[in-house]
Amino acid sequence: MENQNEENERSKTGSDNPVNSSGESGSKPLAHIVAPEKLELQLSVKNLPRPVARAIVNLAKRRKPESGLKTFLKDFLPALTPAATVLISIVALIYTVQQKNRAEAAAKLASLAAERKTLADIIDTFGKTVVPGSTTQSDQQREAHLEVAAMKFATYGDQVLPAMRMALGARDDGLRHGGVLVAQEMYRAKTVDPSKLASQILSYYRVNGPILQLGVLQWLDKMGRELSTNDSRQALSMLKESFGSQGQNCAKQDSNVALEAGAFLFQWSFEDSKDLVLGMAKSCTDSGSRNKR
């Protein structure tokens, strides 16, 4: 009876020497195997040959170890991603700033080169030329020719300002006259805001010597009544600072500067400029008499 029961058990496992869950021979029958990595997966080894059953059991128990790189990436990559994003942003910002600085430096060099070329062209055009009068037709034609040249330079706008300033302060009469014409055409054509241009030219008078002061006053005389009332009032304030509100400092001024200042005040008869004009007439005349002695 016992032998018959053993035979029945062996017939259920399909093997004379069943394999247990550890892959070794044993007396306990093996009905099912649960895969360690997938608990929901069950494999039946019933009716399988013994070598196959043993291989399946060993495979189910074997777990492949993860590589060090995979473990590092899995553990640290989530934490490194925000830092990497910040680093990339910083690098991109640095690159952008460098490119901007290079572009600004290149633009500055180009601007300096353009200013030098403009100054050279103004010198070539107006330097050593005779300042035309206004009495003969020939003089008028020469002046018209110079005005056309000045119009071309006036189209440069802000770019021509440094060259114009140098021309206004030139000792050469022809070059200084060219600077006056360029400034006049810029004011007329509004290639630079007229009020801004006038303020800038008047600022040259306050901080420089008699040659540039003479160029500024020659520009004021050339503009005449074309100046706006506001700009002409600024010029009057400038002369009051220089000559004194009563003209008492006229004797300290260069004679040519004083003459040009008087010509401007003659064109603009301000109600509050009479004391200045009368004082200049007296002080400058007294200075002239003393110099003759």
Image (tube, rainbow, N blue to C red):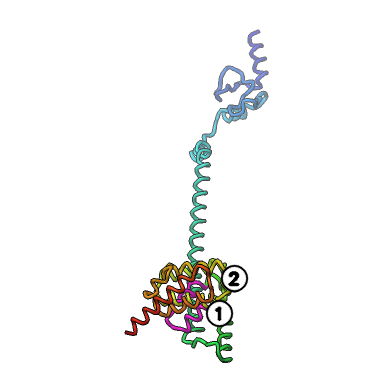
Viewer-proximal residue among 22 and 213 = 213
- Residue at disc 1, secondary structure: helix
Task: Give neighbour class at mark 1: few <14, some 14-19, many 20+ (Cα, 10 Å).
Answer: many
Viewer-proximal residue among 4 and 112 = 112
Which of the two discs, 2 and 1, labels the residue nearer the N terminus? Answer: 1
Mark pair 2, 1: CA separation:
14 Å
The amino acid on which the numbered mark 2 sits, given as a three-letter code, is: Lys
- Residue at disc 2, secondary structure: loop
Q: Give the dominant element type of the magenta stretch: helix, strand or loop.
A: helix
- Say if 230 sits above or below 29 in the image: below
Q: Which mark is residue 163?
A: none
Q: Which mark is residue 190?
A: 2
- Say if 209 sits above or below 37 in the image: below
- Say if 101 sits above or below 185 in the image: above
Look at the image and tell me whether residue 15 can be seen. Answer: yes
The amino acid on which the numbered mark 1 sits, given as a three-letter code, is: Ala
Residue 278, image quadrant: bottom left
Q: Quadrant of the N terminus?
A: top right
Instruction: Name the residue located 56 percent from the left edge and 91 percent from the top edge.
Output: 136
Q: Residue furthest top?
A: 1
Query: Is residue 19 magenta-colored?
Result: no
Query: Is residue 174 magenta-colored?
Result: yes
| Magenta region, residue range | 160-181
Q: Which mark is residue 150?
A: 1
Look at the image and tell me whether residue 212 can be seen. Answer: no
Task: Residue 261: give x, y in percent of width and height.
Answer: 46, 75
Task: Residue 178: give x, y in percent of width and height.
Answer: 51, 81
Q: Quadrant of the C terminus?
A: bottom left
Q: Is residue 76 left or right of residue 211?
A: right
Viewer-proximal residue among 251 and 116 = 251
Task: Give neighbour class at mark 2: few <14, some 14-19, many 20+ (Cα, 10 Å).
Answer: some
